[in-house]
Amino acid sequence: MKKFLSATFLAGMLLLPTTSFAAQNEIILPTVGAKTHEISVTEALQQRKSDRGFVEKDLTLAQTAKILWAANGINREDGKRVNPAGKGVYCVEVYAVTKEGIYLYEPARHKLKLIAEGDFRSVTTTGQSFVEKAAVNLVYVETPAVWEEMEKIPARDKQIFYANVMVGTMVQSVALAAESEGLGTCVRGSINREEFKKVAKLSDEKNILLAQSVGFIK
């Protein structure tokens, strides 16, 4: 656990519900409050690093909500999100993989939608054992179909460029949110892409970009 968390905050966390829920078809996440326990952005940046010493411990539901909101949540009344998007097109989806199942995060309703029940954390890697202990593994997936709504569709190489820029901001936002909760993160390119596509029921045109493990550390 990160040393900068106070004893009072740690005690309070023990009273919060965790995400050790049986797989549910739909999980409405709690609203992310502006005045939860926080550290400064500078402190979060100073603490940020790649962690691999995860322990088997569930996040609270509030922590899960905060992590997913940081990844792809809405922060304005006009529906725009925490992270920027090229041409204003949000072309990256976030899948949350826990020991209960694979969930798609839906920003508009701030909820998780069950895609597949079961522990598929090992599928989000190609052999990194620490991944199977992380409470949640986020998988960032490009969705080219969203560009079809534009009057002038960018060339495919531009679409990929915008997606890569977007996912870069997403993983850093998650890292900072995790630091503020005393959690560790690790961004990973090592993903069993073919197998994850199958178990997550992804259509052929979707492109798996990155994964990010999040959880408590030793």
Image (cartoon, rainbow, N blue to C red):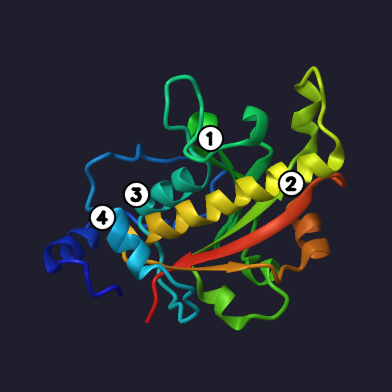
What x and y, as percent, mark residue 106? 57, 37
Q: Nearer the viewer, mark 4 or mark 3?
A: 4
Q: Amino acid at mark 3?
A: Ala
As drawn, is 5 to the left or to the right of 21? left
Earlier in the chain: of badge 4 and badge 2, it is 4
Residue 62 is marked as 3
Left or right: 21 as drawn, with respect to 209: left
Sequence-first disc among 2 and 3: 3
Image location (x, y in percent) of residue 7: 13, 69
Q: Tag 3's secondary structure?
A: helix
Q: Amino acid at mark 1?
A: Pro
**Residue at position x 86%, y 44% in the image:** 205
The mark tally for this picture is 4
| Image x and y of residue 66, in percent | 39, 48
SS under mark 4:
loop
Residue 152 is situated, as x and y percent measured from the top left of the image, at 81, 21
> What is the residue that sits farthest to the left in this orientation?
8
- Element under disc 1: helix
- Upstream in sequence: badge 1 or badge 4: 4
Q: Amino acid at mark 4?
A: Ser
- Residue marked by disc 2: 161
**Marks 1,3: beta carbons within 8 A:** no
Q: Which mark is residue 40?
A: 4
Mark 1 or mark 4, whichever is nearer to me: 4
Mark 1 in CB contact with mark 4 (< 8 angstroms): no
